[in-house]
Image: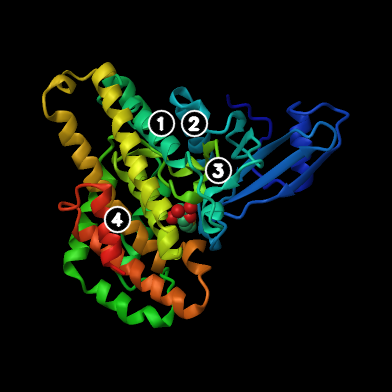
Amino acid sequence: MSVTQQAVYEPLTEITAIKLSKKLQLFSEQEALTCREIGDGNLNLVFHVTSDQSNRGLIIKQALPYAKVVGESWPLTLKRATIESNALLEFAKYVPQYVPEVYYTDETLAITVMEDLSHLQISRAGLIEGESYPLLSQHIGEFLGNVLFYTSDFSADAKAKKESVKSFINPDLCKITEDLVFTDPFFDHDTNDFEPELKQDVEKLWEDVAVKLEVAKLKQKFKTSGEALVHGDLHTGSIFADSHTTKIIDPEFAFYGPLGFDLGQFVANLLLNALSQKEESRNVLYAHIAKTWEVFSQTFSTLWRNEGRDHYTKTEGYLDYVLQRIWKDAIGFAGCEVIRRTIGLAHVADLDGIEPYEKRIATKRQALRLGRALLLSQTTLSSPAELEDLVKQTA
Ligand code: SR1
Ligand code: MG
């Protein structure tokens, strides 16, 4: 649903966000509302509107015409708000239980009004505090298995899929990933951000031809493989959770991309959290990685066998080939993500919050070794257990 009521874009304030909620009749006229801007991400405004009487709430997310993390010198399309709303609606066709409900969207204001998830916690924050989220990997595996299968050519009608690809063309946000994930961290670029103690390690990486060749192949894959609708930024900060619920948010980077991309980003962020934890607390993260892959591959395989539309889904060996390729690509994408979250523009609190400083530097060195090892082991690592061994070898 798109109901444009404002002729021009303007950033909301806490006061106008309340007025908008009233105007949309999402609360009754008499209800006293409170609003707080709670956006702590890199790009957008997020307003939490609550009713003092009924205890009900909602979220209004609004895109800014620039990247908040850098400022107005980095203009950014408002169209990402529409991509985000449409992606949430598309995901909801297959797995409504894993996304917030969208109540309203407005292209001009670049807003999505959606379900209040404030009873849940951002999973990155919880994992840092030692929460284990027992169902996180089960849910993410089901989310990915369903969305990736149903939006891929193995299931979707060929013409309808191409129409959908068109509506999710997202060049500006893809460019951010092409630069920040696949390019800048591997060159001496001014967006990079790392501690002086890491300079030698980083310079060594910039000279590593074998690593750069793998990243070049992955970047090309990211730019050219429109295999299925991907979230595009599936890190643990894009996931709300508690012990029985998981909700995936923020798909403004969504586009038709490689099947292994989201899996790689999610796994990378679990690995970064594992590195930040004490040795004895890491098993829960390794178990999440193994479970994500197990549930994803089972879900995807069951759908493939029961609902595969393409003739070749019946061909012996094809499913195994596709799954192996997804795993291999995911390992490579995870390598890029681990490196960029360590030395690129957008860091993660898992690493930046490590105290004391010497330990933080040592962990970041390990993250760089791990990222490199992932990139160079894509063809040899065949299971989550081998991935766990690889992490241990980088200690
Ligand atoms: C300028 S945007 C930096 C990062 O924030 C987003 O969440 C994406 O991960 C992007 O790469
Ligand atoms: Mg985001």
What's the residue at 27%, 54% (across, down)?
387
Quote the CA–CA distance across marks 4 and 1. Answer: 39 Å
Nearest the eye: 228 or 245: 245
Reading the image, the residue beneath label 3 is: 240
Q: Give the percent coordinates (x, y) of residue 73.
A: 53, 63
Reading the image, the residue beneath label 1 is: 167
Query: At numbered mark 1, what does the secondary structure look like: helix, strand or loop?
Result: helix
Nearest the eye: 14 or 352: 352
Which amino acid does the dot numbered 4 rest on? Glu
Reading the image, the residue beneath label 2 is: 86
Q: Give the percent coordinates (x, y) of residue 47.
A: 69, 45
Quote the CA–CA distance across marks 2 and 3. Answer: 19 Å
Which amino acid does the dot numbered 1 rest on? Ser
Q: Are marks 2 and 3 in contact (CB under 8 Å)?
A: no
Query: At numbered mark 2, what does the secondary structure look like: helix, strand or loop?
Result: helix
Residue 175 appears anywhere in the view: no
Reading the image, the residue beneath label 4 is: 388
Disc 2 Cβ-to-ligand 2 distance below 8 Å: no
